[in-house]
Amino acid sequence: MNIKLKELSESEFHSLNIPILFEDKLEDRNFGLISGKIYSYKFGWQSTAIKPVVTEIDEFRCSIGVDLNFVV
């Protein structure tokens, strides 16, 4: 699996027309994009000291966690 994680500016986040994994419109200060061969998702998080952690589960699945958010 070839997963790419990229930090985005707030304006880039809002201009992208792709699915959102998680978002808190009032509290998010950081934004990111996770993408693979056939998908892309954007997400936001609050903490400036914590970076997202992506873990590959198998060839088709991965997990991403940051702050109190976690998805597979």
Image (tube, rainbow, N blue to C red):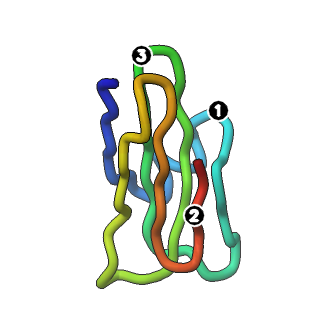
Q: Which labelled disc corresponds to residue 70?
A: 2
Classed neighbour count for the residue bearing mark 2: other residues with Cα under 10 Å, few (<14), some (14–19), many (≥20): some
Number of marks in picture: 3
Of badges 3 and 1, nearer the viewer stands 3
Q: Earlier in the sequence, mark 2 or mark 3?
A: 3
The kind of secondary structure element at disc 2 is: strand
Q: Please state which of residues 41 and 56 is positioned toward the viewer in this rendering.
A: 56
Q: Which residue is mark 1?
A: 17
Q: Which residue is mark 3?
A: 37
What is the distance, in whole Å, between disc 3 and disc 1 at their CAs? 17 Å
Classed neighbour count for the residue bearing mark 1: other residues with Cα under 10 Å, few (<14), some (14–19), many (≥20): few
The kind of secondary structure element at disc 3 is: loop
The kind of secondary structure element at disc 1 is: loop
Residue at horizontal 30 percent and vertical 84 percent from the top:
49
Check disc 3 and give the amino acid type: Lys
Of badges 2 and 3, nearer the viewer stands 2
Q: Which labelled disc corresponds to residue 30?
A: none
Quadrant for the N terminus, please: top left
